[in-house]
Image: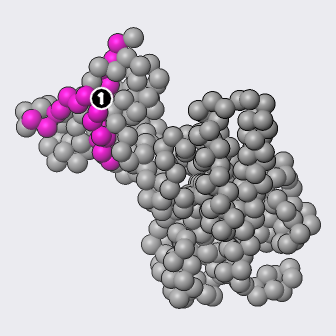
Amino acid sequence: MKIGLIGLQNSGKTTIFNSLTGLEAEVTSYSSQKIEPNQGIVQVEDERVEKLSEMYNPKKTIFATIEYIDFVGLSENKNNNDAFSNSGMGLVKTADALALVVRNFDDPISGNAADPFSDVDSIDSDMIISDLIIAEKRLDKVELSKKRGIKDSALQLEEKALLKIIAHLEDSNPIRTLDLASDEEKAVRGFQFITQKPLLVILNSDEDNFGNNDLLINSLSKKYNVIEFAGTFEMELNSLDTDEAIEFMKDMNISESARNRLTKFSYDLLGYLSFFTVGEDEVRAWTITKGDNAVEAAGKIHSDLARGFIRAECFSYNDLIQYGSEKNLKEKGLFRLEGKKYIVQDGDILNIRFSV
């Protein structure tokens, strides 16, 4: 999973990145920002993986991971017609979801007061403009192809989808709120429209007002998925030992680290779940989307497993913990053989039988 952090300059975006990854990327002001994004990969903490590792004692234990990409801060220049077109923002299109960091503290550089609503609206508008430019340019090429006599069904389907998208964007609506048919969505998938990606808002508060923004969060939540962080505070926690960090988190009424909270939030937002493979060689967590079947899960492990899929040996983590061993599960009739159409559930443990 890749999550791209975006936000206006001086929103505390890199501070959030550091709090999530434990890295120490330079926190810069407007004038010295670099073009290249910061990138960091962190493992998804999952006590189920730890417990399975204790039971199977494998040579390797592999957790699921999330890659965070901290993009260059966006300019507040209202004359910027396409804020997402520069080279430093090219990786935005590769992200599975975007996390928009908005400042909820007075700007220490300019002295400007916090205005989260305005900041969210500004970036939302920039993303819509960026997608509109791409869609209109592609539609022009489609029209040119038609004039040259190219009128195949694929081109007609693409044109239909683009016309829907352009009308939706012109009404200031992101593509993620547009109900495209599956074939229409497939026809434009290659453009990787920014507003088609799931979006969450990170309200970056300071220590003084963290936890006191219910009205603000409720208002933003009418349109966006919102989570609140105390970015600077949570970045500083990384320099403390575990016991000290826990005490300071209690003082701030923070029950979990920023990383764990955003991980859970992201899994819910994207509709992700985890299944596991176990054995003496390796215990591993795999991430798939809710609704994926056994063949799609097999493909996450290796394409050969999906291509030569026969069936999946399956049992649940909860049953394994309850009864203590695979042998006991078999005796209880809880060790199953599932076919291609089986919908994998969160916590399933799979062993794929295949032949190629």
Which residue carries the number 1 mark? 340
Q: Is residue 30 above or below residue 329?
A: below
Name the residue: 36% across, 29% down: 295
In the rendered view, does 290 fall on the left or right side of 210? left
Q: Give SS at disc 1.
A: loop
What is the magenta range? 333-355
Q: Is 30 in front, or is 193?
A: 193
Say which residue appears at 82% left-offset and 59% top-offset.
82
Residue 108 spot, x, y in % from top left: 81, 81
Q: Residue furthest right?
A: 31
Residue 115 locus on image (x, y percent): 71, 84
Q: Amino acid at mark 1?
A: Lys
Q: Position of residue 184 (x, y in %)?
A: 55, 44
Q: Residue at x 47, y 23 (%)?
A: 303
Res 53 visible: no
Task: Tell me if residue 329 is in the magenta stretch.
Answer: no
Vertical arrangement, residue 133 with respect to residue 342, above or below: below
Whether 53 is drawn above or below 34: the answer is above
